[in-house]
Amino acid sequence: MAEKPPEILIVDDEPQIIRVMRASLPPRGLHVRTASSGEEALREIGNRMPDLIVLDLVLPGMTGLDVCRIVRESSQVPIIVLSAKGSERDKVVALELGADDYLTKPFGMNEMIARIRAVLRRASSGEGESLLQAGCVTIDVAKREVRVRGEEVRLTPKEFEVLKHLVSNAGKVVEHRSLLKAVWGWQSAEQTEYVRVIVNQLRRKIERDPDHPKIIMTVPWVGYRAERVS
């Protein structure tokens, strides 16, 4: 029996985007479902959860950010956000809400497909140790649970991946580009603001004093280091 192709839910109110996605993704082994509004997207998700969501930020009625927020309350399904806006603020808000990646319109279809495959690959990856620990931080990789000083901490998917990568390399300096490639893929190797946003969010959740971190340390101009603190 042939393996079922991944289902991609495209949420966009631009007919041209929908037409191009419907024409381009199936020949690459990706099944396409579509929604033209946030409300329709939530109905589609409620009927059957897709393997990945491509979500436009600007939608009639409910915004893409609203959809992202609602989905993240109950699901870790991968989300790639689309927007005609290229400002850093848009990226920051999307990442803070738990988006896995970000593309600015107009985009090339080859890049879109590469990003979809990279996000799906990372979402299904289960390699590595099942339990990671660095001082007061314990990560159960299989359960995707994080405890800091014995207390469970709720993280977004990207916060989890960044912390997991840093803790698995505790005591070592992880360069910006290395962290970007490990968590976002090679396409995002220059997007250092991604890492800055996620690290700032992590510090607010796991540090006693986020302004004077003891767990995730900044190595100026190079990257970050997870300390072996207790």
Image (tube, grey):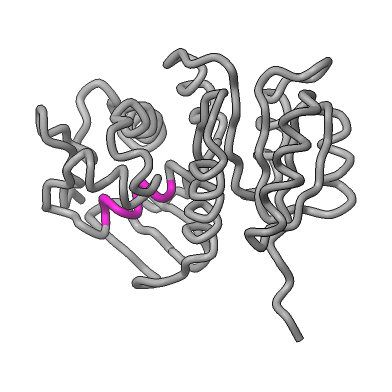
Task: Identify which residue is drawn at 17% across, 43% down.
Answer: 175
Decide which of 171, 195 is in the foreground and name it: 195
Q: Is residue 5 above or below residue 3?
A: above
> In the image, is residue 162 part of the stretch drawn in magenta?
yes
- Identify the image quadrant of residue 107: top right
Task: Identify which residue is drawn at 16% across, 52% down.
Answer: 228
Q: Percent x, y for residue 38?
A: 80, 28
Q: Percent x, y for residue 35?
A: 83, 36
Region rendered in magenta: 160-167
Question: Is residue 208 among the parts visible in the rendering?
Answer: no
State left or right for residue 60 relative to residue 52: right
Task: Identify which residue is drawn at 37% across, 27% down.
Answer: 197
Task: Identify which residue is drawn at 68% across, 61% down.
Answer: 6
State left or right for residue 4 relative to residue 179: right
Decide which of 147, 8 is in the foreground and name it: 8
Q: Quadrant of the N terminus?
A: bottom right
